[in-house]
Each structure stands twice: as structure tokens, then as C-alpha cells.
Image: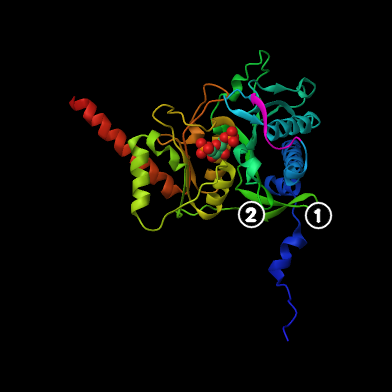
Amino acid sequence: MVDSYQPLDHELALDRDCTTLSRHVFQQLQNFGPDAQDLSALMNRIALAGKLVARRLSRAGLMEGVLGFTGEVNVQGETVKKMDVYANEVFISVFKQSGLVCRLASEEMEKPYYIPENCPIGRYTLVYDPIDGSSNIDTNINVGSIFAIRQQQGEDLDDSASDLLQSGRQQIAAGYILYGPSTMLVYSIGKGVHAFTLDPSLGEFILSNENIQTPEHGPIYSVNEGNFWQWDEGIRDYIRYMHRHEGYTARYSGALVGDFHRILFQGGVFLYPGTVKKPEGKLRLLYESAPLAFLAEQAGGRASTGTQDILDVIPEKLHQRTPLIVGSREDVALVESFIQERAREEASVAVKT
Ligand code: AHM
Ligand code: MG
């Protein structure tokens, strides 16, 4: 006869502790002052948006008007999915009620969205990608939302949002929601990186992984190799190196959040380099690369353009794109070494000719 299963103490621990997101923010800041209240409320609002998006995604194939394209093209020149529009609106409506955010800027809106009724009190800006990896939606593969919170500086009376054109080091908080087999919210307020898993029966995000540390090195490289023919030689050299050395394996889902999540936990590197025609690459600095760079650094990893830390890049425009190399310190450095080696060779050829 098989003995009945007796859970071990540590297996019960998560259920017993039930650390919620707002409690976790207060724990980290170790006070209940106004800034801690704000951050806790902001994170709660982001969690609410995540739950609303997750709920719709979980039944997408059964509902009318959820999957497919709207027929429109966004400011990035990309076709818009119905879920992109829905998720963008969810974040707006959730933050309209918050009283805390005066301005939202997203991938789906050419200009920031202002909430004038919040402006006298709400001094924060939310930058976000409502649905990252939206080409995955119609085939029921993971997607995500990426966010960062910045303190609004100045009055922004001319709608220029010029104070957003500052480096990623100005981010107060950053994170993402991953809509995968379970929905997870991963965030940092500059005190490590922490992951919460949505318990659908409670409707709450519960702390599941505290102080995540990315390994110094990992086996995974994550890149769209279909772009090989368009890359600079430095990136091609790196990929050839991957192909010729033992101990590496490729993983690429087409959704940055999912690919980054794997590397955050298991190590390795994600890259979306520029191409010869588009040296700035595809990913957007303010609401894709910089938030993930913030998390990567907080978890002991790195994020680079190939020549500069992502968090040091000062954007010139809201929807600026940037090459992104992010993950374990050693693996990011390896990619950079190939880029820089080629740059040196090209410079020395230029000097000789
Ligand atoms: P999106 O935010 O419009 O979905 O675009 C960003 C996505 C990333 O999630 C992903 O890493 C990349 O674009 C995939 O692009 P590609 O299909 O060119 O590999
Ligand atoms: Mg995106």
C-alpha cells in the first residue's frame, strides 16, 4: 500500500505566507510613507490591468472580436491587433481611476495620453507596451505586457513630454506581466527582482520568487536567426561561434517577455540587434528595452546596445528604437566582444585605405 502523501513544510509555505504585491512593496520600502503608499497603489493598478488582460486572453478563442487584426496600422507602422487596442484601453481606464498617474505613453499611441483630472495630484507617468509579442496571440502562444513608472518632471504644458527623454536610470519601477501557462507579474522598485503568480481562485498575485538572480552565464541564446542575412558581421560572427561550440541551445518564442523571462531565471542572452538597413533594430527603448534592462541589472545581469549600457541611453524621441542584448553578464559581454572586434577591424581597414 502506498502511504498517503504528506506535504513538506516548505511546500506549504507559499500558501501560508500569501504575500501580496502591495504588502511586498511596503516590506521592501520598510515604511508606510506617501511614496510607499503611491508605489503600492501603482503596482496594485498594474496588477489589476494584468488580471483584466489575462481574463480576456484566457477565453480569447471562445469570444467574438478578441482575436485578429483591427485593420489599422499604429505609429510604428505595424498592423494592430484587437488585443493591442483592448489592452491599451485597459491600462488607460485603470489608471484614470487611480488619481496617481497624470500621463501614459504606450507603443499604441503616437502621443502620450493625459489625464488632466489626475494632474494636480498624479505626478507619475506610466510607459508601457500593452501587448508585447502580439503576433503570438492568434495561435495561443505566450504574450506579455511591459511597464515602467517614471516621476513626472515639470508641468509638460506643451504636451511635449520632453522629461521622458531621459535615461532608463530615471525609472522608479519597472516590470512585466507574462501571460503564459500561469500569469506572472515580475517587478523591481530598485530593490531586487521579484515574481508573483496569479492565483485565479483568489484573483490575487502571490509572491512566488523573491530576489531572483540571473546566473553569470547560461546556455540559451535567443534571437531571430531569420535575420542573419541582414546583420552586421559582428553579430554573424557571434552566431557562428554559437553554432560551433558545445553547450549552447537556441530558444525563441517571438515574444520578448517570454524569452526574457526564461533568461532572467536560467541565464543566457536575448538579442534583437540592428540590421544594416535598420541599425536601431526593432525594439523600443522607453517601454520595452529600458524596463527589461532595469530588471536585468537588478537581477545581476546586464543590458547593452552592443556599445553602451541600455540604461544610459538618452532617447531623442518617445518611440525610439534600440538594439538590445540582455541577460547574463558573461553572455552579454561575449556578444559585445564580437561586435567590438569587428568595429576595430573595420576602423583599422578605414585608416589604411
Ligand atoms: P510587438 O511589441 O509589436 O509585439 O513587437 C515586439 C516583439 C517582441 O516581443 C519580439 O521579441 C519581437 O517583436 C519579435 O520580432 P520578430 O518577429 O521580428 O522576431
Ligand atoms: Mg513589444
- Please tell me which residue is depicted at 52% across the width and 50% down the height of the picture: 263
Q: Residue furthest top?
A: 158
The one of 201 and 58 positioned closer to us in this rendering:
58
Q: Is the C-beta of the residue carrying label 1 under 8 Å from the nearest atom of ligand 1?
A: no
Sequence-wise, the earlier of marks 1 and 2 is 1
Q: Quadrant of the N terminus?
A: bottom right
Q: According to the image, label 2 marks what residue? A: 210
Q: In the rendered structure, find residue 282 and report the number of the disc placed on it.
A: none
In the picture, residue 135 is in which quadrant?
top right
Residue 66 placement (x, y as % from top left)? 73, 37
Badge 1 amino acid: Ser
Left or right relative to 150: residue 265: left
Residue 158 placement (x, y as % from top left)? 66, 12
Is 59 located above or below residue 3 in the figure? above
Is 255 located above or below residue 151 in the figure? below
Is residue 245 covered in magenta?
Answer: no
Badge 2 amino acid: Glu
For the question of whether residue 176 can be seen, the reply is no
Residue 8 placement (x, y as % from top left)? 70, 72
Residue 107 placement (x, y as % from top left)? 62, 29
Q: According to the image, label 1 marks what residue? A: 201
Region rendered in magenta: 65-72
Split into quadrants, the picture shows ligand 1 in the one at: top right
- Please tell me which residue is depicted at 72% across the width and 83% down the height of the picture: 2
